[in-house]
Image: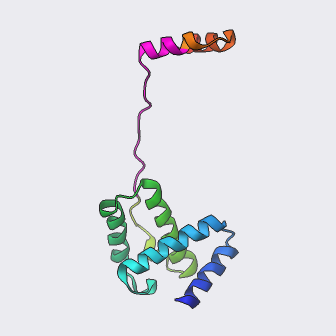
Amino acid sequence: MEGKLTKIRKEFILHGLSEKTQKTYLHCLLRLQKYYCKPLELLTKNDIKEFLFYLIHTKQLSQSSITITYCALQFYFKKIMGNKAMIEDMPRIKRKKKLPQALARIEIKNLINALTNLKHKSMLLTTY
């Protein structure tokens, strides 16, 4: 694996990835290899799906962590291994949409009354 790590690091540098991204991608790849206890080249598409499911369901990682792992796998299989089919059609986790939290009338009133600058106060009064 040491020779493979050197090759991966060289590819990271050639593609201009930042140190932080290199470290994160390498961590994701090592976590995948540790999970299956076999070289990454021997993994199947189904293995990768199972690993992503494990991260989402069992480890309950955040959407951004899953996306970073997906990007690391995509970089490895597309750029280093030259195997686009391995990561193609892989489902991606969707970002949860949240509605903004609305302020209560009393909170708005307190906010406006707390302002001392007339310009700021008039902007907020116009907004609300």
Residue in the picture at 63% in, 10% down = 122
Q: Position of residue 50 (x, y in %)?
A: 32, 71
Q: Nearer the viewer, residue 52 or 119?
A: 119
- Image height check: is 110 above or below 63? above
Q: At 41% across and 59% down in the image, what residue appears?
A: 92
Q: Is residue 9 magenta?
A: no
Indicate the quadrant where residue 11 lies. Answer: bottom right
Residue depicted at x 40% and y 79%: 34
Snapshot colouring: rainbow
Residue 114 drawn at (x, y percent)? 57, 13
Q: Quadrant of residue 46?
A: bottom left
The quarter holding residue 14 reads: bottom right
Counting from the top left corner in percent of width and height, residue 1 is at: 52, 89
Prevailing secondary structure class for the magenta stretch in the rendered image: loop
**Total tally of numbered discs in the picture:** 0
Q: Residue at x 58, y 90 (%)?
A: 3
Of residue 70 and residue 20, the one placed in the foreground of this image is 20
Give 8 or 104, whichever is nearer the viewer: 104
Q: From the viewer's perspective, is residue 36 above or below residue 15?
A: below
Question: What residue span does the magenta drawing correspond to?
Answer: 93-111
Q: Where is residue 105 shown, x and y percent of the image?
A: 43, 13
Q: Is residue 89 above or below residue 110?
A: below
- Is residue 11 found left or right of 32 in the rendered image? right
